[in-house]
Image (cartoon, coloured by chain):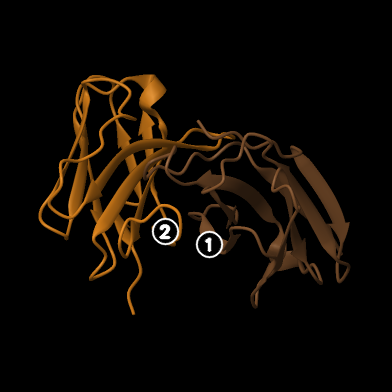
Amino acid sequence: GAGVSQSPSNKVTEKGKDVELRCDPISGHTALYWYRQRLGQGLEFLIYFQGNSAPDKSGLPSDRFSAERTGESVSTLTIQRTQQEDSAVYLCASSLEGLADTDTQYFGPGTRLTVL
Amino acid sequence: DAKTTQPNSMESNEEEPVHLPCNHSTISGTDYIHWYRQLPSQGPEYVIHGLTSNVNNRMASLAIAEDRKSSTLILHRATLRDAAVYYCILTGFDTGNQFYFGTGTSLTVIP
């Protein structure tokens, strides 16, 4: 079956522009996660969606970052007024039930964002 | 954050076993130990997880110390395709639903 897909795979933008990144999770997965990975670094948690519950936004680095998810399907991560420090790979993952202790997260290939 | 400590890098010869260590001295009784790996230019992929007992699957084995303050991921015969960054992660009540990835161990496999 299809895995997690993300689009675009690469995005180059100018400082100050807004960008939208898209994630299509595995069908039937109720939980969805966004992470950021700067060059040579580990993954930073950004936001978590679980079903119809309020999202866990505790990892969002500033109010320029926001994310939405429609039901248990597509999610978009929006970065407003992009800054050069936003340059990174943005990874999306989904899991069946969002049970962190036992669930497996399936990751997409990521979107590489470059802010000039 | 639930803390884990891993060596920054390790090397192994091809077709030899590899033991990747992870220290988690502050682990709580309900925390699970997960291992993921990230191949170059890809998203992370699940390797294995466990709670108290040692675990085996087709990819690897996970050996968990009796006091659970450390664990070891064992690749029985390293191949060039196993060259990746390996992350040891604790998950459970204290971490909520978040996976805290550190910088992991970068494994180099020498042909």
Residue A2 position in % (x across, y down): 32, 74
Task: In the rendered view, tell whether residue A70 sits above or below residue A39.
Answer: below
Q: Are marks 1 and 2 on the same chain?
A: no
- Residue type at mark 2 is Gln
Choose top left, top right, bottom left or bottom right for residue A21: top left
Q: Which residue is mark 1?
A: B46
- Image location of residue A36, percent across then percent down: 41, 37
The quadrant of the picture occupied by the N terminus of chain A is bottom left
Q: Residue at x 40, y 37 (%)?
A: A45
On the image, the x and y values in percent for residue B108 come to 78, 52
Q: Residue at x 61, y 48 (%)?
A: B87
What colour denotes chain B? brown
Q: Label 2 lies in what chain?
A: A
Would residue A108 be found to the left or right of residue B44 on screen? left
Could you classify mark 1 by the number of other residues whose Cα lies within 10 Å: few (under 14), some (14-19), or many (20 or more)? some
Residue situated in front as seen by the camera: B19 or B81 = B19
Q: Give me the residue at 30% from left, 29% from top.
A: A58
Q: Quadrant of residue B75?
A: bottom right
Residue type, mark 1 in image: Tyr
Residue A105, numbered circle: 2
Q: Is residue A2 visible?
A: yes
Answer whether residue A116 is visible to the viewer in this image. no
Residue shown at 49% from the left, 39% from the top: B100
Q: CA distance from mark 1 to mark 2?
A: 7 Å
Q: Position of residue A61 (x, y in %)?
A: 33, 23
Subunit under mark 1: B
**Between residues A53 and A5, which one lies in front from this camera angle?**
A53
Question: Which chain identifier belongs to the orange chain?
Answer: A
